Image (cartoon, grey):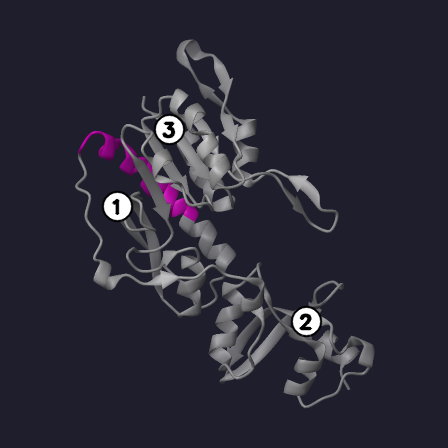
Amino acid sequence: MPKIIFFGTPEFGRVILEALLTAKFDVVGVVTQPDRPIGREQKLLPTPVKALASAQGRSASGGKENKITVFTPADKPELLATSHKLLATKPDLFVIAAYGLIIPAEILQIPKKGAINVHPSLLPKYRGASPIQAAILNGDRETGVTIMLVDEKMDHGPILAQKTLPISSTETTPTATARLAHLGAELLVKTIPRYLAGKTTPKAQDDAQATYTKLITKDDGKVNWTQNNIEIERMIRAYAPWPGVWTTVFEMADQLERVVKNPAHANLKLKILSAAVEDGALSIKTVQVEGRKPISFGEFAGGYLA
């Protein structure tokens, strides 16, 4: 059984890792990002990938159960510093799924059979950090997953396999991510044995058809009210749950040609959690005022606007 080191961080990566373990691939190590403070209490929690890896054993010779070795480098220098430890495991293959850091060429040269990446788009479309959000923002009706070989350029390597997935008009980033993760996991466990047996023909990407996505920031969630209603509604679905789409109580009142009852509330951030476009108009369903619980838009308007 070939030895695999897995690179991944969020829930998307966890689903992929779980599929490898369920299919009895020999995962000898996991590389993920460090524990991060989460929530209001800023409790230090492991990434979903680390949580799974730490809870699982792997079958070793003689049936003995061993813990999966987990590496948590915070940046490129720390990742490079783990190279001798990764090399010591004598891996045959790296599998990468939403790791979150660029893996240096020195590290990619370690496995005998190279590195495979699970990317949630139909490459060469939507290379980069936010392919799922891009598909929703652009109103695509179809996306998919690509299993590809990794080279030194971003999402550039030859394609081993692809599978499409329809996108509904109500798709959000969390729902699409979950569906694409399971689709990618299914495709990956079928592709790895074929690749290692030399039964696949890697297909070079057409760079002329490549499109690129950006690294999303908090500021991307700020509503620009000059956008049309369809664009805003897509933003709400694409930027859930992070960074979220928001405006201020004052700006919302201004859009409705109303006033804020309490001036102290005017500059509070107002997250728009759900909405729909009905007869061309943006119908906001659920909102959350900064520091409060989510409420219906009717409750918000009745409580904050005059």
Name which of mark 2 and mark 3 comes first in the sequence. Answer: 3
263 vs 65, nearest the viewer? 263
Quadrant housing residue 24: top left
Residue 4 numbered tag: 3
- Element type where label 1 sits in the image: strand
Kind of residue at badge 1:
Ala
Residue extent of the magenta highlight: 181-198
Kind of residue at badge 2:
Leu
Query: Which quadrant, please, contains the C terminus?
Result: bottom right
Q: Is residue 113 left or right of residue 75?
A: left
How far across and how far down the image is residue 285, in percent?
62, 73
User: Does the stretch in magenta take in 195?
Assistant: yes
Structural distance between the alpha carbons of marks 1 and 2: 42 Å
What residue is pinned by disc 1? 161
Classify 10 Å Cα crowding around label 2: few (below 14), some (14-19), many (20 and above). many
Kind of residue at badge 3:
Ile
* Residue at (64, 39) in percent of width and height: 45
Name which of mark 1 and mark 2 comes first in the sequence. Answer: 1
